[in-house]
Image (spheres, rainbow, N blue to C red):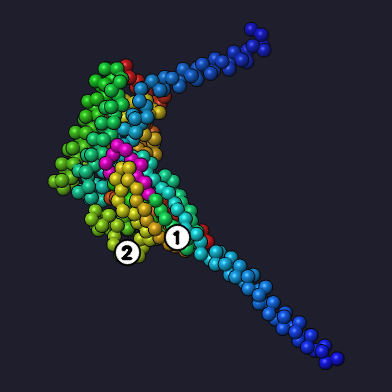
């Protein structure tokens, strides 16, 4: 009769040992899955000029909030020796940033330095050139982008759709 | 003619007519280059108009390079066209380049009044060039910027420029 509690005790101890052993991989897997959902992957976005014309192709881009974005901008012009860039700004800030960029001058790439409304900007690019900028996508919303070379922004603009 | 043959005959005639119209529209040897050249000239008019409006005079003279590039492309594109056409259009292209030079000089001098006049001169000169080409090669109305243009920012009503002739009957190279 006295052996009965020992066997039960042993079984209980074995179960207590097995439980974390079995649960650990599940727990780890669960954590990994949650981690993947929170931190989006790096995304590469491509955009270029419409040849020599004052337009971006495409005019709309999409990425997830918090994503690490690598944006590749290509100047697809062949004939006209003009420069372009790609500047992402806070909603409603295009006109003010364009003016501020003009005041900043060519030396600053026509982009106002240390302006929190500028979320990302490539360097200026000549025909055939490519520029890359990396940034973390802002919170969900529609963010305008444009070319800040004086006078180009009226035609060269588009929207980055940031999804949740 | 039997009824059974009538329909195929009509379809064939329609196809032939369509082919003839399409052939007439692509009569120029380098339509794509012409399209690009015209759009570049038109783009300069719009862009310089915006720069002048914003009193961004220092950039205006630089636009001459863009104008030169568009003009060079057009000269190259019409090189294979009949001599009479080149004799008519070539000087108009050169006039647009000269008008751009005058505007650049006015911008360097920061002469507001002269800048407005010379920009109007450039717009008129570019319009004269554009009008020499068939409708399907001209910049689209949405892209017609600046004074005399037909798009946003332009002063035109949205239709063809005065004196451009009735729609569908653009001037053709002789």
Can residue A99 be spotted in the picture?
no
**C-alpha span from label 2 to label 1:** 21 Å
Identity of the residue drawn at 42% across and 19% down: B24
In the rendered image, residue A70, in percent from the top left (x then y), is placed at: 42, 55
Q: Position of residue A86 (x, y in %)?
A: 36, 52
Kindly identify which residue carries mark 1: A68
Residue placed furthest toward the left: B109
**Residue range of the region highlighted in magenta in the rendering:** A73-82
Q: Is residue B40 above or below residue B111?
A: above
Q: Nearer the viewer, residue A131 or A145?
A: A131
Q: Chain of mark 1?
A: A
Q: Which label's residue is closer to the chain start, 2 or 1?
A: 1
Choose top left, top right, bottom left or bottom right for residue A48: top left
Q: Is residue A74 magenta?
A: yes
Of A141 and B114, nearer the camera is A141
Where is A37 relative to A86, above or below?
below
Q: Which quarter shows the N terminus of chain A?
A: bottom right
Question: What residue does disc 2 label?
Answer: A115
Q: Looking at the image, can residue B97 be seen?
A: yes
Residue B148: image x %, image y %? 30, 37
């Amino acid at each position: 009769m006295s052996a009965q509690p020992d066997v039960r005790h042993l079984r209980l101890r074995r179960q207590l040992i097995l439980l974390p052993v079995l649960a650990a991989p599940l727990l780890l897997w669960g954590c990994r899955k949650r981690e993947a959902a929170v931190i989006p992957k790096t995304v590469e976005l491509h955009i270029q000029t419409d040849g020599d014309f004052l337009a971006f192709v495409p005019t709309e881009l999409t990425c997830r909030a918090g994503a690490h974005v690598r944006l590749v901008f290509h100047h697809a012009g062949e004939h006209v020796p003009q420069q372009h860039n790609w500047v992402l700004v806070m909603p409603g800030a295009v006109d003010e940033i364009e003016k501020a960029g003009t005041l900043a001058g060519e030396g600053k790439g026509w982009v106002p330095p240390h302006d929190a409304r500028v979320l990302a900007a490539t360097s200026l690019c000549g025909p055939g050139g490519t520029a890359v900028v990396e940034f973390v996508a802002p919170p969900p919303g529609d963010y305008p982008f444009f070319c800040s070379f004086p006078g180009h922004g009226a035609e060269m603009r588009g929207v980055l759709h940031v999804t949740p | 003619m039997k009824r059974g043959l009538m329909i195929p005959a009509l379809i064939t005639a329609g196809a032939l007519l369509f082919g003839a119209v399409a052939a007439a529209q692509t009569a120029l040897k380098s339509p794509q280059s012409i399209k690009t050249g015209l759009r570049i000239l038109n783009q300069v008019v719009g862009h310089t108009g915006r720069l002048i409006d914003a009193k961004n005079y220092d950039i205006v003279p630089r636009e001459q390079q863009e104008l030169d590039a568009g003009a060079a492309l057009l000269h190259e594109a019409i090189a294979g066209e009949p001599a009479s056409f080149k004799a008519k259009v070539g000087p108009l292209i050169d006039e647009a380049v000269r008008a751009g030079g005058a505007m650049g000089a006015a911008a360097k001098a920061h002469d507001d009044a002269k800048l407005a006049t010379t920009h109007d001169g450039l717009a008129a000169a570019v319009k004269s060039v554009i009008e020499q080409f068939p409708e399907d090669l001209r910049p689209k109305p949405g892209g017609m910027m600046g004074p005399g243009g037909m798009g946003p920012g332009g002063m035109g009503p949205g239709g063809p420029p005065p004196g451009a002739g009735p729609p569908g009957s653009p001037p053709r190279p002789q």
